[in-house]
Amino acid sequence: MDLCNARGSDYDMNMIIKSNHRYWPGISLIEVVILIGIAVAIGVIISVIRNPSDLQAQSRNAQRQHDAKAILNAIHRQANANNGLIMDEITVTPQDLCDPAAGITCPPETIDLGEKLVPLYLSEIPVDPLIGSKEDTKYSVVRDVNNKVTVTATGAELNQKISYTE
């Protein structure tokens, strides 16, 4: 028995053929965007979980960069206020900065710039965010023969060198 004759018309045969054809819709643009967003979020979460100490070290290095620039700018503002003369305390030998504001005595191998920089040019002498102390801030200062001052963050992490010269 023929299927067309059993149903009674050619139109019915077309319906049978169409009903057996499976239609698979494509993926819409919004679905693609959602999938990409999910993949990016998973990647960010994995990178944060794997290296939180590196992110913290990068954050501390950013603070060191800010502090070193602030110290250098304060030294130059103080020099500009004194007819361009850089303080005698800053020599051609690198010296670590000390902050005796807490009532401590600075070790002999350090330099105290607090009296000349605080509070007029800096609110306080910055201290390294991880290993610095008031006795040794882990910032050093040196002057070259051309009177260019260099401030270095000696406690930098991730093998990064943080040093600014003007």
Image (cartoon, helix red, strand yellow):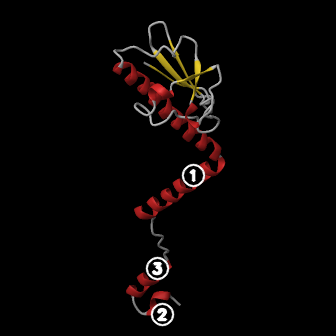
- Which residue is disc 1 drawn over? 43
The residue positioned 45% from the left and 64% from the top of the image is: 31
Q: Find the distance from the CA under tag 2 to the CA under tag 3.
A: 15 Å
Q: Find the distance from the CA under tag 2 to the CA under tag 1.
A: 60 Å
Residues 9 and 49: in front is 49
Marks 2 and 1, the one that precedes in the sequence: 2
| Type of the residue with mark 1 | Gly
What percent of the width, then of the height, locates residue 13? 43, 84
Residues 114 and 142: in front is 114
| Type of the residue with mark 2 | Ala
Marks 1 and 3, the one that precedes in the sequence: 3
**Circle 2 Cα neighbour tier, 10 Å, few/some/many (<14 / 14–19 / ≥20):** few
Mark 2 or mark 1, whichever is nearer to me: 1
Query: Relative to 45, does residue 119 appear above or below in the rendering?
Result: above
The residue positioned 51% from the left and 16% from the top of the image is: 90
Could you tell me which secondary element the residue under label 2 belongs to? Answer: helix
What percent of the width, then of the height, locates residue 156? 60, 31
> Which quarter of the figure has residue 79?
top left
Q: Which mark is residue 17?
A: 3
Could you tell me which secondary element the residue under label 3 belongs to? Answer: helix
